[in-house]
Image: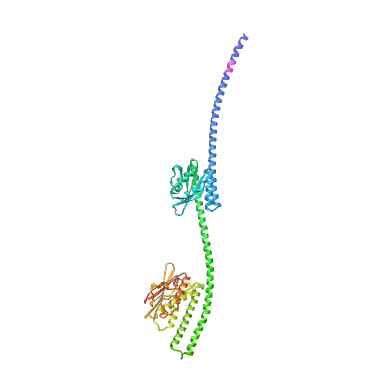
Amino acid sequence: MASGKRPASARSCRKRAESEIGRLNAELEKRIAGSSAQLETANRDLASGIKELSLSQEILLRRNRELSVLYAISRAATQSLELEEILQRTLEATLEALEVEVGGIYLLESDGKSLTLRAVRGVSDQTIENVRHVKWGEGLSGRAVAEKKPVVQDVKDYPSKRLAPSIIKENLKSLASIPLLSGGQVVGAMNISARRARAFPPEELELLAAIGQQLGISVQKARLYEASQHELAERKQVEEALGERTKQLELANQELKSFTHSVSHDLRAPLRVIDGFSVALVEDYEKILPADAQNHLARIRGGVRRMSELIDALLVLSSVSKAEIIRQSVDMSGLAQAVSERLIRTQPDREVEWRIENGLTVVGDSRLLSLVMENLIDNAWKFTSKTDRASIEFGARLQPDGQSVFYVKDNGAGFDMAYADKLGVDFQRLHSVAEFPGTGIGLSTVQRIIRRHDGRVWAEGEVGRGATFYFTLWQRRSHDE
């Protein structure tokens, strides 16, 4: 009985074992399926991460390339202010960064209507000559400056019939041009060309636009430097010319000094001899000299006196030209009054109406301005000598710029305005010596003195109705002091 029960127990154990194995297999398969799903998810995540990393590396490389080319441009601009060098180094850095073969930089001319090729790489000399000058709006660069934005073009659609043959001959396929801007103003354009068909993606156009901005500023700086160098060179030339002129003036002054010495001493001596012997002839032989001879001697003595007066006038003129100006307050009204009193004493019987404005003062050299008043009022006195009821007037009117127009006015002989340009010219006279004596130097003296005071002299007149002589000086009225 006992031996018959053991097989049934074994079968039961086997069933339980098979059931447990089945359960374990099912659980294992379930776990394997779950792990496979997790592994697939992990693989997908890993692939996505690798892709993102690759994109990040590509972006990083592109950004690094952009920074490198911008740094190269900045370095070129800081290391040199020579425009041609900056343009060439910028062009080469840009072509290298974009991996293209051909490029050129145009700059806008001062007329604002044309561009000139200033830097180029990758084309023949013949092509350079053909495309060296471009009009505003012509070709790719002309469009870029006109539109103030990048322009991309395929060679088959090139916008200029004149320039297209040269572009085709160079086997260029893809072209781009960007404007060079400085402060919003166009200064030129950069052209980039490839001998293979390629696109210029947005990131490259953004880089080119940044290059255009940076290069535009560099161009303006270099041009300012060129202008300053040109101005310095011109200034140096002017300084050298002034130095040479100063040497010439010093030499001329030395010669004038020698001439003045000669006039003062060497010319006066023979005049004294001539005058002395003329007087001796008259005194010793007056009774036996015929009237004609005495008249000749009188004329000789008159000529000697006139020559002496001319020498005196020349010496005054010379001293006026080289005398140092000592500026101080000068009472012009007082000077005019003093001259009038001196003239009245010389001819007390003359009837002249004097009108001298009071309180007129200027800043100038007292001694030189005294000569001005003496010459002008002496002239008025002289040219009214044949006028009944003569009048001489001195006054001034203030101008808005702080200068005053002074004048000496008379109602004497006057002059013809057609000959006004002769006034103030050495030895030029509008009246004969017989009619009115004089040397013709007085007004020249006045001209030089007033010019040395940064003023000017002019005159108005009418024959038989008098003359007015004007001169400008910086005035100070006594009640303003």
Q: How many marks?
A: 0
Residue at 53 percent of width and 74 percent of height: 257
User: Is residue 367 in the magenta section?
Assistant: no
Q: Is residue 338 above or below residue 474?
A: below
Tell me where residue 387 appears, x and y as whole percent: 37, 80
Range shown magenta? 13-18
* Image quarter in which the N terminus is found: top right
Residue 406 seen anywhere in this rendered image of the structure: no
Tell me where residue 405 appears, x and y as whole percent: 42, 71
Give 31 or 224, whichever is nearer the viewer: 224
Q: Is residue 73 above or below residue 39?
A: below
Tell me where residue 440 appears, x and y as whole percent: 44, 76
Please, which residue is most extreme toward the bottom here? Answer: 287
Per the picture, the main secondary structure of the magenta-coloured stretch is helix
Give 91 or 284, whichever is nearer the viewer: 284
Residue at 53 percent of width and 39 percent of height: 58
**Res 5 quadrant in image:** top right
Residue 93 seen anywhere in this rendered image of the structure: yes
Tell me where residue 101 appears, x and y as whole percent: 52, 44
Please, which residue is most extreme toward the right here? Answer: 3
Q: Is residue 67 left or right of residue 398?
A: right
